[in-house]
């Protein structure tokens, strides 16, 4: 028995020590990646924009462009763009997520608290964006655990690769350490420009996207994180407390709305963008072809059919403008025309000049030139000065 114990106990202790060492090593590795500093180059970008690591952040995602932007609040209290990160993989189609298992990457305005940060993620590092939010719940949408995480595999998440996920994690961590209680995560189908809105005007989600457009315009005009609520099943945004910023939003949103209407009136094409299953930034597509390791890539065969545009309304050429009546264009070129506000100094248009007098010069030539030439030949007179009476520039201007 004693001999058995002498053999068994050391082996057991050795196994326990090995297991403890392995766990300690794993914990240390997890702690190291979760506490990795923000890269010096990114800190330099922050400093150049008048902000720093501890300042509050807002993240903005664009599915069609496959990008996530980091914005930080500067010393003047305005959010400014710091850096854009390529998304390695997102899944589904353009449009909001509505149910668990639909592989849709959400769209809308979400909130990320410190408790949603996951340093122990199976996908390197991650944070939960907060789906479903109040809008999603008001529409009966289901699902959970939608993350921004590492590797390159998505089932409704924003997959960024390990290195990018680690940098985003560190930026959020430092913002929390600086006192931010939660940050806003804005997710859009595409960059919310007037051109994109006009181009996707026939999409079934266009009414929803107009709500997102309002929030996007508000953020860009005011530089403030939008205060978002849900009323009557729609996103609602509180006005800015700063009257000047609210006026800036009103002007921008009106200009954008007018621009969309003008593009439609001019006959801009309308399209639907379809995906086999989500998309990927061209940067990562090129790196993967070069053999760069990004971890598992979800449904790589689907990427060949990403972003196919189906034309719903072809572009229409505007007819040429009708010819201007003679009475109108004659008035335009008149001396009192307000359209001719800039004139060359001392310029006299031909229609205002006196008719040219041809008889007198010809007579003077016939009478005087032979005698002048003869006198010059005989050296009785210096050569005649035949320089033009007007500078060449003025003569050209009168033609």
Image: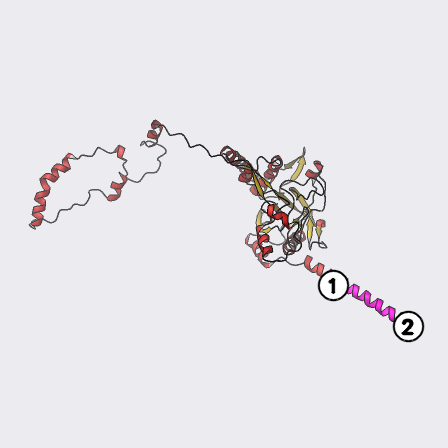
Q: Which picture quadrant has residue 185?
A: top right
- Locate residue 328, reporting x and y percent: 36, 28
Check the picture and name the quadrant holding the N terminus: bottom right
Image side of residue 326 versus residue 283, left or right: left
Residue corresponding to mark 2: 3
Q: CA distance from mark 1 to mark 2?
A: 33 Å
The residue lying toward the viewer, choosing from 323 and 341, is 323
The residue lying toward the viewer, choosing from 217 and 25, is 25
The residue lying toward the viewer, choosing from 240 and 254, is 254
The magenta segment: 2-27
Image side of residue 205 versus residue 374, left or right: right
The residue lying toward the viewer, choosing from 181 and 368, is 368
- SS state under label 2: helix
Q: How many marks?
A: 2
The first of marks 1 and 2 along the sequence is 2
Q: Tell whether position 173 is magenta.
A: no
Image side of residue 36 versus residue 46, left or right: right
Q: How is the image coloured?
A: secondary structure
Query: How many neighbours does mark 1 have within 10 angstroms: few (below 14), some (14-19), or many (20 or more)?
Result: few
| Magenta highlight: main SS | helix
Disc assigned to residue 250: none
In this rendering, is residue 14 above or below 175? below
Check the picture and name the quadrant holding the C terminus: top left
Query: How many neighbours does mark 2 have within 10 angstroms: few (below 14), some (14-19), or many (20 or more)?
Result: few
Residue 58 visible in the shown view: no
Q: Tell whether position 17 is magenta.
A: yes
- Locate residue 311, reporting x and y percent: 55, 37
In this rendering, is residue 156 above or below 211? below
Residue corresponding to mark 1: 25
In this rendering, is residue 88 above or below 96? below
Tell me which residue sits at (59%, 59%) in the image.
40
């Amino acid at each position: 028995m004693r001999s058995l114990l002498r053999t068994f106990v050391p082996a057991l202790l050795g196994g326990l020590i090995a297991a403890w060492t392995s766990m300690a090593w794993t914990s240390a590795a997890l702690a190291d990646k979760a506490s990795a500093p923000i890269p010096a180059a990114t800190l330099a970008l922050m400093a150049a924009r008048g902000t720093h690591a501890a300042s509050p952040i807002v993240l903005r995602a664009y599915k069609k462009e496959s990008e996530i932007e980091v914005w930080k609040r500067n010393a003047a209290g305005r959010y400014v763009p710091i850096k854009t990160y390529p998304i390695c993989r997102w899944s589904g189609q353009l449009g909001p997520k509505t149910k668990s298992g639909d592989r849709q990457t959400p769209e809308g305005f979400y909130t990320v608290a410190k408790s949603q940060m996951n340093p122990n993620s199976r996908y390197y590092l991650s944070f939960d964006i907060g789906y479903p939010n109040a809008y999603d719940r008001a529409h009966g949408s289901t699902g959970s655990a939608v993350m921004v995480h590492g590797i390159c595999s998505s089932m409704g998440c924003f997959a960024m690769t390990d290195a990018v996920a680690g940098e985003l994690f560190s930026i959020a961590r430092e913002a929390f350490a600086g006192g931010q209680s939660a940050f806003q995560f804005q997710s859009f189908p595409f960059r919310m420009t007037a051109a994109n809105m006009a181009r996707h005007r026939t999409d079934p989600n266009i009414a929803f996207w107009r709500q997102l457009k309002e929030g996007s315009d508000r953020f860009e005009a005011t530089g403030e994180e939008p205060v978002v609520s849900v009323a009557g099943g729609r996103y609602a945004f509180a006005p800015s407390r700063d009257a000047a910023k609210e006026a800036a939003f009103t002007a921008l949103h009106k200009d954008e709305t007018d621009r969309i209407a003008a593009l439609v009136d001019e006959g801009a094409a309308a399209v639907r963008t379809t995906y086999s299953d989500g998309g990927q930034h061209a940067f990562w597509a090129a790196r993967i072809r070069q053999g760069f390791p990004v971890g598992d890539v979800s449904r790589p065969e689907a990427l060949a059919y990403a972003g196919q545009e189906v034309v719903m309304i072809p572009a229409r050429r505007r007819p040429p403008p009708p010819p201007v009546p003679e009475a109108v264009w004659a008035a335009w070129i008149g001396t009192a025309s307000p359209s001719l506000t800039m004139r060359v100094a001392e310029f006299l248009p031909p229609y205002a000049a006196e008719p040219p007098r041809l008889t007198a010069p010809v007579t003077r030539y016939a009478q005087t030139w032979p005698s002048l030439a003869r006198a010059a030949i005989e050296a009785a007179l210096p050569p005649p000065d035949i320089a033009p009476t007007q500078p060449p520039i003025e003569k050209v201007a009168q033609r």
